[in-house]
Image: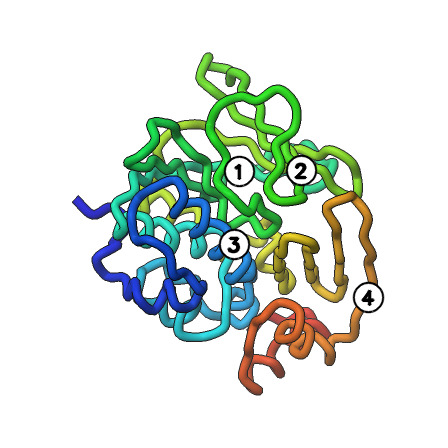
Amino acid sequence: MSTWRGADLDLDAYLARIGFTGVRAPTLATLRDLVYRHTTTFPFENLEIILGRPVRLDVESMQDKMVRHRRGGYCFENCALFAAVLERLGFGVTGLAGRIFLGADTRLLPATHALLHVTTTDDERGWLCDVGFGSGPLEPIELTPVDGELTAGAWRFTLERDTDVLGGSLWTLRHFSRNGWLTRRTFTMNPQYPIDQAVGNYYVSTSSHSPFTTRPIAQRLHPEVHHMLDGLTLHTNYPDGTGETRTVRSSDVPKLLTEIFDIETDAADAAKLVNHLDTGELQ
């Protein structure tokens, strides 16, 4: 049974978009290559929400937006598209849900982050694939507690397993950043299906409590640098914990989206984004 609608995918077009020319087999080597290429090709962005359009998670809509055009998506889009790819190639794919932590803020937020548990045919281990967070990791992470740090390229992480209030497994992924070691997300092994992600997607894309309904947010990750646009604030971060922050003009945002984030907008959408940044009005 197809859970992620992999049969609806134009696999050739997707693989061409990310520059994949390797073996189309559900192996660990292929998984590593796919995660790296997907994460460094597709930017994280929420522009559909700011432009007043719904975020659609059907394969055809995601293909048209992200594969046929130079656009990205936020976690639900990246996760659903990548799940369809993996399913089509024969990987074992199960959706998971996580809670995001914003910087040093440890307040409990809804479990509205989408990630994946993946298995391969040449390895019995389970792998965490989080292609929709915006700042990595750039490769799958084995789902086993590790003493000390994990490295995904030059970026540094830790993965810890604890127990939740009912005695189940609670996993915590931490990331080294400008502010030192920060908890980025927690997640459990409770399976999530497309219908569950549709509920989370609706909340995140429509609720006034969601940060994604108030301002444009874009992220682009490379092995050596991570860029993030949060409204009119542009952050540039490096694996060693250094970085810079500057304020940009609203009129410069469409150009920055193209040049830094590889997000192309037409003239009408560019004008709407600038108007939102100037007035705060949603389209």
In the depicted structure, whether residue 161 falls above or below residue 261: above
Q: In the rendering, which numbered label is found on residue 156?
A: 2
Return the residue at label 3: 39
* Residue type marked 3: Thr
Return the residue at label 4: 247
What is the secondary structure assignment of the residue under circle 1? Answer: loop
Distance from label 2 to label 3 (Cα)? 16 Å
In the foreground, 37 or 275? 37
Mark 4 vs mark 1: give the one in front. 4
* Residue type marked 1: Pro
- Residue 234 coordinates in the image, percent (x, y): 75, 62
* Residue type marked 2: Arg
- Residue 144 coordinates in the image, percent (x, y): 48, 23
Mark 2 vs mark 4: give the one in front. 2
In the foreground, 139 or 59? 139
Q: Earlier in the sequence, mark 4 or mark 1?
A: 1
Mark 1 vs mark 3: give the one in front. 3
Return the residue at label 1: 110
